[in-house]
Amino acid sequence: MNFDIDIFGTIVTAVFVLFIGYFLVNKVSILKRYNMPEPVIGGLVAAIVTYFLFTQLNITVNFNTDIQRSFMLVFFTSVGLSASLSKLKEGGKTLIMFMFCVITFVILQNVLGISLATALGLDPLIGLITGSVTLTGGHGTASAWGSIFENEYGIQGAVVLGMASATFGLVIGGMMGGPVAKLLIRRYQLAEEIAPTQQRTEAPPANETAPFEYPEKTRLITADDAVKTLGMFALCIFFANFMTDFAKGYWFELPTFVWALGCGVFIRNTLEYVFNIKLFDRCIDVFGNASLALFLSMALMSLQLWLLAGLAGPLLIILIAQTLFLALYLFFVTFKVMGKNYDAAVLCAGQCGVNLGATPTAIANIQAVTNSYGPSHKAFLIIPLTGAFFVDIINALVIQTLINFF
């Protein structure tokens, strides 16, 4: 039996799930100790409930995907509207170094996937599906490329496999970031845990904040500011939907969220540098953080965990190997390349989301860590741009190159 929940029911459920996450993280010491993101924990509880309903009572709960997609577009638009060229320049050398770490891992992720698939007697393209197509690309990339693998390369069940692999990555990426950062911070004594109320009362430095950096900071917003900001969000998403339809089948076809992000970057910097108009960063930040929390809750509570239960042994072996390989890569490459300091540890938590989940997971990871150990301005500058923009372009080029090779 199917139980369909409409838009408002989905929002209510997502808010309830988010509150469950807040409650559990604050009350269960092990979750707090390892900096688990609240939306991830709450979403997993909801996913387990829907899994029980499906397996024991044959009830499938379907949440509204349109509202989930809308919150995703608002989130990526907020990244674009926050991407001032001055902040991009501020990232500078650190951004380039982190991009090097991420791009290198994308290539190695596919090498590992293809090698293991070949060794296990599977089609090498299945190794690509369980590589950067799904783990770095996420559900959207998995769905898009899965159809291509099925129709053009004869990989039966590629879409289902892709969605299951992306689900695995989203779950593990959200659970892995906090413990990895905590282990690095404690091992190298990089920071001390702060008091629970300190992060909330600490004022952000004037003109030195990055998107999503102070999610619990109170911001003064007028109705006029909110209306103007909402108008910019609507314009970006309208443009993104238009370009998605217009570009279909052409060489410049891109996912909708990339168009939304790109439009946000254009509007932000055109207004700022051409017309000398300052944007309402506090509004953008509030909209971005709210949509991030709600989207991540919806994404996790909508997971069909029974897809993971259906993964064949060889495919599960590949995914576990990918997880262990990322952990080793973070410890021995990213952490050292980025300077073996507190910022480097937070960036490692973010990379768990970038290369094994999704950009919202990456940001939730670094928020969870900085809520416990204090701010990391560099991480909040670098992770949104890397995960939401640069890595998708690089990943698409790597996937296409490897497909042409095979």
Image (spheres, rainbow, N blue to C red):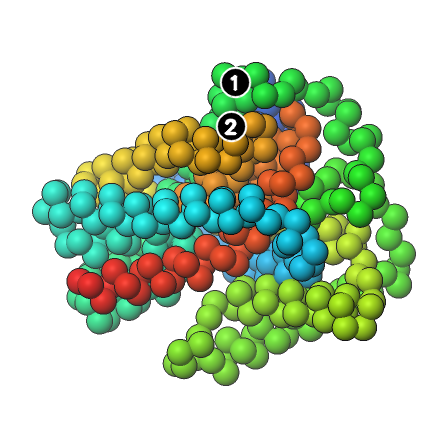
Q: Position of residue 392 (x, y in %)?
A: 45, 58
Circle nearer the N terminus (1, 2) = 1
Q: Position of residue 261 (x, y in %)?
A: 59, 64
Residue at image position (28%, 49%) is 110
Q: Are marks 1 and 2 in contact (CB under 8 Å)?
A: yes
Q: Position of residue 322 (x, y in %)?
A: 31, 39
Q: Up-down: is 326 above or below 372? A: below
Residue under label 1, please give it. 188
What amino acid is at disc 1?
Tyr
Residue under label 2, please give it. 340
- Residue 201 as seen in the image, left or right of residue 78: right
Q: CA distance from mark 1 to mark 2?
A: 8 Å
Residue at image position (54%, 64%) is 257
What amino acid is at disc 2?
Lys
Callout 1 secondary element: loop
Q: Is residue 124 visible?
A: yes
Callout 2 secondary element: loop
Residue at image position (88%, 48%) is 220
Q: Position of residue 163 (x, y in %)?
A: 36, 53
* Residue 248, picture quadrant: bottom left
Instruction: Between residue 374 and residue 245, name the one nearer to us.
Output: 374
Q: Which mark is residue 133?
A: none
